[in-house]
Image (cartoon, rainbow, N blue to C red):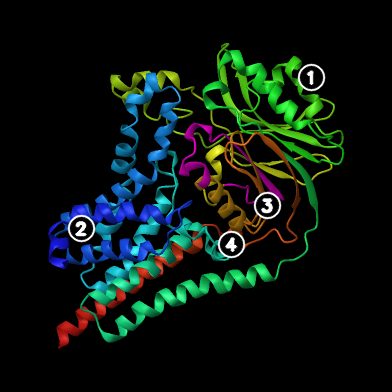
């Protein structure tokens, strides 16, 4: 059996990558990683050359990302007559590019010859390249390996210590360890191969139980109304429906009196009108503003340059009852191939139809707390900005809560909206801050500072939700203070240990 697997490394590494997707939300079949991570590790130990090692990692990543991100192609089906032919390109491009982020870690771990050194180095290099994936070409850190623990409120509490990258590091340590039992290693190593997964999983749940059992009383509670109109994506930007879509938001917001409501929250680009330059639509919106609170909405904002050119921004606005825009935020992490085209001038002519259909949005200045008179400072996150660990708040001016406005209607009833929600939960745990998430078609939710969902609106439901959001008594977490330094230190320690064991064996062989 092992000989057959070793003779077909590409096939089985690809299969291992595909199987790993089943561990992600919303499926959460996490025990399968013992098989998939273990299979990859065994293939790496049987690889005959650096080339084989590289392609074992590449085909693993190709399978993981091509299947795990295939739902992104659903956006092309909104206008399927124009863009439907590009659908197969999405999984091929995702696997082809992101497969490099597992290929190079495997290649680097292959520099170590013995199984123990390989085992120590592989989690480190996988985690480092996962971190690199968060900023290369503006970054896309979707589906980090540590997100497989999102099925449990307890297991993800460790993200408050070392973030999602620490969870990814620990995941590789846990799920790859048992495969050492199949390799020629010492009895001590075989005992460790059983002990490490038991200790790692025990740590996650014991720490989580302890953290959630000692929660201080919140200092403040906000009364919030989340509005989810579930407007079909095919109609959202249809000129004939813009006024109706706008009216739907207002109608849902006012179905019940707003007395006692602090904030009404609308989704990303809920207003297709530039409210800062459109007094008529700003006047229309006033019934949806709480009399003693604020409305937070997504909108498109235009800025005119001295040369009479327009700059387009994906923005968030805080509107007071008197009709003034009290604060605003411009999206700083733009979606590649969604809000701008990277390296546009170098792309081939056959992809021109899609590049011409995408607006060139401008980049905002980054996360800043929005000052709202009489209320705690709030941090704004638009769409997938919430997926970037360590980049969701201003470290020097931390807000007391976060608002994530998004529109996942592009992706239909796929894994995407569920994974986006779980990502928001992870950011809440990392930063120790509650998050309100308002999505056009769902999943909208209120998440406390421990990543627990207080209430949510399911996918594709047209409804509003009133919720009381507890603000944290203690705003600090270890990860919030130190960011990605701690998981990178763990990776460095693994690599140093691998070098130590390697050198010790070399010295022994010289003097034996």
Callout in the foreground (4, 2): 4
x 20%, y 70%: residue: 113
Q: Earlier in the sequence, mark 4 or mark 2?
A: 2
x 44%, y 19%: residue: 357
Kindly report the distance in space between the C-alpha atoms of the residues bearing marks 2 and 1.
63 Å
Kindly report the distance in space between the C-alpha atoms of the residues bearing marks 3 and 1.
31 Å
Residue 92: % across, % down: 29, 38
Q: Earlier in the sequence, mark 3 or mark 4?
A: 4
x 58%, y 11%: residue: 308
- Magenta stretch, residue numbers: 392-418
Nearer-the-camera pick, 165 or 492 = 165
Callout in the foreground (1, 4): 4
Mark 2 highlights which residue?
A: 53
Secondary structure beneath label 1 = helix
- Which quadrant: the C terminus? bottom left
Residue 239: % across, % down: 58, 14
Mark 3 highlights which residue?
A: 434
Kindly report the distance in space between the C-alpha atoms of the residues bearing marks 1 and 4.
43 Å
Disc 3 crowd rating (10 Å Cα; few below 14, some 14-19, many 20+) is many
- Please state if 266 lies on the left or on the right of 260 as rendered: left
x 62%, y 36%: residue: 461
In this rendering, the answer to whether 305 lies above or below 201 is above
Mark 4 highlights which residue?
A: 153
Q: Earlier in the sequence, mark 3 or mark 1?
A: 1
Mark 1 highlights which residue?
A: 283
Secondary structure beneath label 3 = loop
Secondary structure beneath label 2 = helix
């Amino acid at each position: 059996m092992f000989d057959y697997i070793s003779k077909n490394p590409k096939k089985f590494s690809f299969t291992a990558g595909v199987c790993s997707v089943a561990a992600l939300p919303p499926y959460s079949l996490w025990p399968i990683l013992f098989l998939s991570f273990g299979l990859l590790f065994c293939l790496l130990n049987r690889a005959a050359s650096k080339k084989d090692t590289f392609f074992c990692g590449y085909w693993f990543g190709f399978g993981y990302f091509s299947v795990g991100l295939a739902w992104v192609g659903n956006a092309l089906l909104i206008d399927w007559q124009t863009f439907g032919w590009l659908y197969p390109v999405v999984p091929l491009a995702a696997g082809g590019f992101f497969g490099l982020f597992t290929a190079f870690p495997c290649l680097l771990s292959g520099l170590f010859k013995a199984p123990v050194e390989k085992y120590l180095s592989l989690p480190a290099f996988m985690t480092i390249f996962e971190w690199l994936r968060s900023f290369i070409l503006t970054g896309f850190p979707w589906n980090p390996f540590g997100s497989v623990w999102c099925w449990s409120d307890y297991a993800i509490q460790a993200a408050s210590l070392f973030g999602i990258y620490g969870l990814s590091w620990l995941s590789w340590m846990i799920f790859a360890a048992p495969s050492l039992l199949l390799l020629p290693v010492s009895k001590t190593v075989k005992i460790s191969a059983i002990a490490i997964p038991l200790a790692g999983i025990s740590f996650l749940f014991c720490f989580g139980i302890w953290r959630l059992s000692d929660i201080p009383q919140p200092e403040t509670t906000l009364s919030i109304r989340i509005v989810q109109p579930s407007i079909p994506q095919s109609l959202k930007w249809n000129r004939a429906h813009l006024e109706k879509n706008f009216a739907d938001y207002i109608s849902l917001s006012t179905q019940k009196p707003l007395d006692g409501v602090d904030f009404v929250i609308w989704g990303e680009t809920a207003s297709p009108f530039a409210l800062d330059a459109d007094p008529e639509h700003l006047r229309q919106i006033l019934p949806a503003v709480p009399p003693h609170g604020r409305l937070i909405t997504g909108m498109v904002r235009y800025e005119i340059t001295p040369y009479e050119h327009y700059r387009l921004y994906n923005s968030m606005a805080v509107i007071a009852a008197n009709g003034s825009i009290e604060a605003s935020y411009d999206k700083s992490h733009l979606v590649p191939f969604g809000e701008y085209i990277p390296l546009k001038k170098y792309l081939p002519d056959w992809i021109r139809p899609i590049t011409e259909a995408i607006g060139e949005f401008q980049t905002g200045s980054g996360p800043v707390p929005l000052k709202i008179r009489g209320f705690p400072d709030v941090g704004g996150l638009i769409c997938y900005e919430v997926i970037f660990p360590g980049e969701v708040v201003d470290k020097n001016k931390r807000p007391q809560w976060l608002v994530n406005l998004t529109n996942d209607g592009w992706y239909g009833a796929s894994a995407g909206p569920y994974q986006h929600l779980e990502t928001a939960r992870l950011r809440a745990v990392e930063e120790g801050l509650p998050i309100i998430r308002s999505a056009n078609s769902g999943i909208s939710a209120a998440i406390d500072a421990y990543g627990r969902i207080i209430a949510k609106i399911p996918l594709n439901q047209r409804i509003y939700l009133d919720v009381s959001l507890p603000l944290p008594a203690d705003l600090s977490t270890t990860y919030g203070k130190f960011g990605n330094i701690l998981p990178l230190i763990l990776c460095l320690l693994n690599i140093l240990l691998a070098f130590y064991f390697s050198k010790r064996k070399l010295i022994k062989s010289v003097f034996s």
